[in-house]
Image: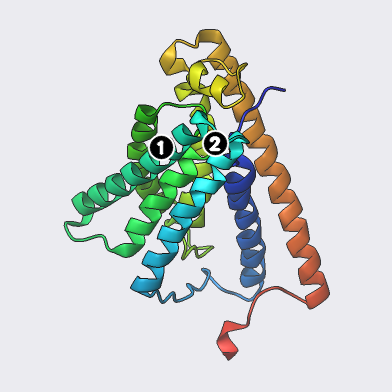
Amino acid sequence: MGVRDFAGGLVVHGAAGAAGLAVVYKIWQEEKRKGLKESPAVSLSVSPGWLTLSILLLWVGWFGFNPGSVLAFNNEATVVVLTTFLAAASAFLSTMFFKYLIDKKNPGLPYAANGILIGLIIITPLAGFVSPVSSVILGLLGGPLYLAGEKWFGRYKWFSDPVSLFPGHLLGGVFGVAMIAFFTQNDFAAASGNSNLPNGLLFGGGIAAVQQLGLEMLAIVVVLVVVFVISYLSMWLIGLVMHGITTDYGKE
């Protein structure tokens, strides 16, 4: 139909968020039957050294994930390396800066790691379609997007999200896909093998860009609904076989 998703912003990250939402919803249904008013938060112990190493390895690994989607070792693959790096670096700076403005203290390593991650997630569906300058702008938007998402999802007590799946993968993946219709530049898209992708709205794409936005939004809705339903049914089946998927916290 003409939907584009350069390296899996929707089919990887958005879908992961939809699957996670189905899982926590099934968990909450069981917890409600047990009489719980809110989902018990699971304690999370993070080693600073291992966290730093893991996010650096993930960042380096993403240089295979995004540039590999060019399917050729050429100049455009180098550009995708650059857009991937710049988006992650600028999102890291943006997240740390805005979190510091909010709390007036050092945000700490978890926010540094999630800042890098939200930049990588946002640029994934766009990496071969945008300029390096656009990738910096997208990364800078990632910081406030992540923090706003964390605050919004944190209001709901019927699930626990210790690794920020929803403000990171779900929100970041959907946002990145939607931004294809705004930030795409045809010269970059053509170099990565997508010559029929129009310029985005911010680059004079006009009606063609609006049509692309409609296609991307349709894809978002279809993928999220389908993945949610499949994941929920999978959890329901597992629960049926195992007589539930939750732990009886009160007896631990």
Asked which quadrant contains residue 33, the reply is bottom right
Residue at image point 32% right, 57% down: 112
Q: In the picture provided, is 163 more to the left or to the right than 34?
A: left
- Looking at the rendered structure, the secondary structure element under dot 1 is helix
Residue 239 rendering spot, x and y as whole percentages = 76, 70
Q: In the picture provided, is 139 more to the left or to the right than 251?
A: left
Q: Which residue is mark 1?
A: 82
Amino acid at the residue labelled 1:
Leu
- Disc with the residue nearer the chain's start (2 vs 1): 1
Amino acid at the residue labelled 2:
Pro
**Tag nearer the camera, 2 or 1:** 1
CA gap, disc 2 and disc 1: 15 Å
Q: Split into 4 quadrants, where in the image is the N terminus?
A: top right
Are the residues flagged by discs 2 and 1 in contact, CB closer than 8 Å? no
Q: Split into 4 quadrants, where in the image is the C terminus?
A: bottom right
Residue 71 rendering spot, x and y as whole percentages = 63, 36
Residue at image point 44% right, 74% down: 44
**View extreme (front): residue:** 74
Mark 1 crowdedness (10 Å alpha carbons): few <14, some 14-19, many ≥20: some
**View extreme (left): residue:** 104
Q: Which residue is mark 2?
A: 125
- Looking at the rendered structure, the secondary structure element under dot 2 is loop
Q: Is residue 68 above or below residue 113?
A: above
Q: Is 130 or 41 nearer to us in this picture? A: 130
Mark 2 crowdedness (10 Å alpha carbons): few <14, some 14-19, many ≥20: many
Q: In the picture provided, is 228 more to the left or to the right than 129?
A: right
Asked which quadrant contains residue 79, the reply is top left
Q: Which mark is residue 170?
A: none
Q: Is 222 or 131 nearer to us in this picture? A: 131
Q: In the picture provided, is 34 more to the left or to the right than 91?
A: right
Residue 161 rendering spot, x and y as whole percentages = 49, 62
